[in-house]
Image (tube, rainbow, N blue to C red):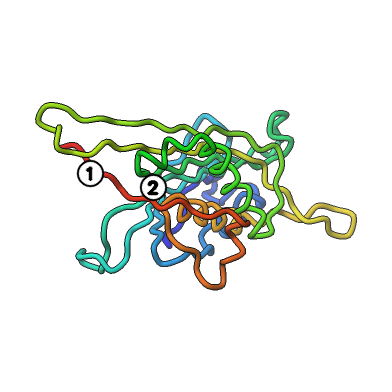
Amino acid sequence: MAAAHGHLADGADGADTTPAPFRQAVQALRAARTRLEVEVEPMPAPKRLAPYACAFQASVLERGGTGAQGEGEELADGRFVLLYDPAGHDAWRGTFRVVTLARAELEPEMGADPLLPEVSWSWLTGALEARGVLYGEPSGTVTRAGSSYFGGLAEQEPSTQIEIRASWTPAGEPEGGSQAPPDLGAHLVAWCDLLCQVAGLPPLPQDTSSLGGVVPLPQRRGPQPT
């Protein structure tokens, strides 16, 4: 996986003045490993949300396709942003905040399921819990949007897209009366698990527990307008 890009500050003498917790968090993100179907790349981080930030964009690709590396169509995509404010943030109730987006296309009948928003949110919380990460102050939205095509596009089937926007505050493990830094790499891996789930991929044999009892909906990527 490519390295993360963050807002890293240099002093007048060129020394790195980035706070150690953020440097450690970026290193943990760089060291995270996801399943082969997920491609994660760094992207420009937002500059106004926190003093320090790093960001990734990710895609879930169908394996065994006709691409140069055996890749097929894109099944899901999203972004993962880590924010850090050394002074803390009242709304976060912490110094770190994870902000994410995951989206994929569904069969229209699946998108019409009235329980889809609740199930989709349970995928996120289940993925975090399956990886054993601690978190607090979760918030987010689940949006579904349908498209019908007309005129020159009338032959295309209707499509429905699901979009999960979520944020949460990573928490550390209690350690000798103090709080150890959160394992941000595990948070990224858990989010990639969510991305694979909205893409409709079956869990890996060692990850069967990550479904949390929720059966993934069969999904496909709909044809794109030209």
Identity of the residue drawn at 43% across and 33% down: 144
**Residue 217 to residue 49: above or below:** below
Where is residue 206 drawn, in percent x and y? 56, 72
Identify the element where label 1 is drawn.
Answer: loop
Q: Is residue 68 left or right of residue 137?
A: left
Find the residue positioned furthest to the right.
177
Furthest-top residue in this view: 151
Q: Earlier in the sequence, mark 2 or mark 1?
A: 2
Q: Position of residue 35 (x, y in %)?
A: 46, 66
Q: Amino acid at mark 1?
A: Pro
Q: Residue at x 16, y 27 (%)?
A: 150
Please tell me whether mark 2 sits on a helix, a strand or a loop: strand
**Is residue 57 found left or right of 118 in the rendered image?**
left
Q: Which mark is residue 223?
A: 1
154 lies above or below 122: above
Q: Mark 2 is on which residue type? A: Asp
Report which residue position mark 2 lands on: 77
Q: Indicate which disc residue 162 carries.
A: none
Classify the position of the N terminus by image quarter: bottom left
Query: Dot 2: within a 10 Å radius of its alpha carbon, few (fewer than 14), some, or many (20 or more) residues?
Result: many
Separation of marks 2 and 1 at Cα, in angstroms: 15 Å
